Image (cartoon, rainbow, N blue to C red):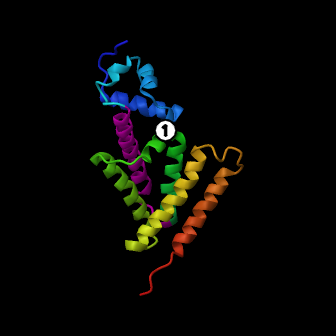
Amino acid sequence: MVRAGLSRAQVCVAALELADEVGIAHLTMTALARRLGVAIPSLYEHVRGMADLLDVIAARATNELAEILDAALRGRTRHAALEAYAGTLRAWATAHPGRYAATKRPLTDPEGAASQARIVAGCATLLRGYTLEGPVGIDAVRFVHSAVHGFIDIETDGGFRAAQNLDKSWAAALEAIDRALTTWPRPAE
């Protein structure tokens, strides 16, 4: 049951695909070995164990998300940037629920931490169109992050299964976020 030529990158890609199919909570070394057609000990030539595997796939998924969010924001400001950022995030998360769950893991390795910082910076960039920077911008980033991820988390966890007109609710939520950002409280000067 040995597969010659298996690399760490192939193990990671297979793990990401499996996480999308079964959920990150159900990703195991046994299931991954089965998917790759190798014995479980063979995986340890490429990852140090489950913790290492989760760390590396979290970094890869976060980098993937940062790339698509960067592209979505290019040339857009204000409401168009908000719709592009949030819509791209939602589409990616619903298409890749295991990867999305991986992006929520704390990342300490330099690559993963840099990708997380790029995602936050992208959100901060879209807020510049609303002239929300500095401490006010930090509050607004937290607000947008909480609102958008809250909706997406409930959706990807199946909490809206019985909901009708989910896209209409999403559009209304983005309108409300846009209105909140447009009227965001400013410190007295």
For numbered disc 1, what is the local secondary structure? helix
Q: Residue at x 39, y 31 (%)?
A: 13
| Image position of 97 with respect to 31: above or below | below
Q: Crowding near pointer 1: few (<14 within 10 Å), some, many (20+)?
A: many
x then y, percent, for residue 55 = 36, 40
Asked which quadrant contains residue 131, the reply is bottom left
| Image position of 65 with respect to 186: above or below | above
Q: Residue at x 53, y 46 (%)?
A: 91
x then y, percent, for residue 108 = 31, 48
Quadrant in which the N terminus appears = top left
Q: Is residue 96 visible?
A: no
Quadrant in which the C terminus appears = bottom left
| Image position of 51 with respect to 110: above or below | above
| 40 drawn magenta | no
Residue at image mark 1? 98
Q: Residue at x 53, y 40 (%)?
A: 95
Q: Amino acid at mark 1?
A: Gly
Q: Residue at x 48, y 66 (%)?
A: 78
Q: Is residue 39 visible?
A: yes
Looking at the rendered structure, the number of numbered marks drawn on it comes to: 1
- What residue span does the magenta drawing correspond to? 50-78
x then y, percent, for residue 23 = 52, 35
x then y, percent, for residue 83 = 53, 58
| 54 drawn magenta | yes
Q: Nearer the viewer, residue 129 or 102?
A: 102
- State the predominant SS element of the stretch in magenta: helix
Asked which quadrant contains residue 171, the reply is bottom right
Q: Nearer the viewer, residue 136 or 29?
A: 29
